Image: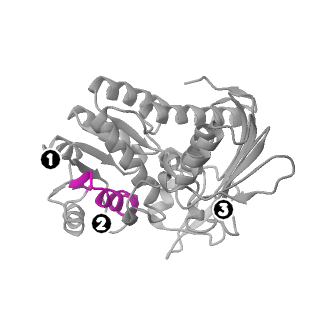
Amino acid sequence: MADGRIRVGVVGANPDRGWAARAHIPALRALPGYEITAVGTSRAASARAAADRFGVPHAFTDAAELAAHPDVDLVAITVKVPAHDALIRAALGAGKHVYCEWPLALTTAEAEGLLHLARDAGVRHAVGLQARFSPAVRYARDLVADGYVGRVTSVNVYAARGKGGAGEIPGFAAYTLDPSNGAGTLEVGAGHTLDVLEHLAGDVTALSAELAVQRTAYTVAGTDEAVKVTSPDQIAVAAVLAGGATAVVHVHDAKVTAARTRIEIAGTDGDLALVSPGPGAAAGVQIGVLALRGARGHGSPREELPIPEEYLWVPEPARGVEVLNVAQFYARFADDIRTGGRTVPGFDAGLRVHRLLDAVRLSAETGTRREVAQP
């Protein structure tokens, strides 16, 4: 680390679009503990363009060379899921810390292998389950732990994106409609949502699930090309949590009307509701602003619960709708790297979500309830 700052190489830093340009790079540039020293893409022209746009000294087309560079302490991987395994292995082989976007890997077996490698490498590893770092989610988690709702008895989760109305999809996103790419509504939307469920209310011990495709095709925007949907856009899960509470989760990606997210936690003494009031609602629980409402006592109406400032620990430039949760994650990850702490989800957390999704798939395929092994 130079001057105490963690030097970051961003793999997948497309200069024109993509999650790196929209969230990772703005977050890192806003945080004083980081410096972006390298960017990488698959083409020399775009790598150089990214370096020029973001004011970064080094540009690469080979991720292994980026990871091996002495000016890189941390490798951030923000590319399509099928490439994650090889890129993480290259970074770990170079002895560098790793932040990989969720999903961690294409398969649970890959995720298991990456966790073992990361532990053997002795570096810090993180998976981008950034919904945990939403200020509203953090505050709700603390309220639950402090007994605001009493003993949790039930959780109801509804998360819907309004993609179904237009019937079009950008060409660069069409790959998400094919489950072989590991980035559909099940993996991304339900993955983030199930992680937040467990983060707030306890681990899932058993579940039953249904999967369906309701929107069977999209047109690639600006063309006449039709793309068949084979990845489920409807995920319904009924679960039992470790403390005995029941949970119902419905995630879907083909809503015609306005998108929204809602998480209700009911207990013996009260309840809490996380809701998406506006900005970022279309993206799901992992992106955007959530409001928190609560009530305690018999028949009490819910009221807005303002989020204390202590739950917002990043500077104003990092508080944009798409940037906030990622920036909050990076701020805590910097602390972990410097102190040896473990406040952000590592590859073990990613493996946990992969196993949850395996249980969802198997339950839907067999029509049976599945027990979920505890972490």
Q: If the image is split into quadrants, where does the N terminus sit?
A: top left
Taking 331 as reference, is 371 above or below it?
Answer: above
Q: Earlier in the sequence, mark 1 or mark 3?
A: 1
Q: Earlier in the sequence, mark 1 or mark 2?
A: 1
Between label 1 and label 3, give the one nearer the viewer. 1
Instruction: Report the residue marked by disc 1.
Output: 2
Task: Work out how far the residue at label 1 is from the one at label 2, CA to CA, in angstroms.
Answer: 25 Å
Amino acid residing under circle 2:
Pro
The magenta span reads 18-42
Q: Earlier in the sequence, mark 3 or mark 2?
A: 2
Instruction: Report the residue marked by disc 3.
Output: 260
**The one of 280 and 215 positioned closer to us in this rendering:** 280
**Circle 1 — which element?**
loop
Measured from the top left, where is residue 179 in percent x and y?
54, 46
Residue 15's disc number:
2
Amino acid residing under circle 3:
Arg
273 left or right of 37 in image? right
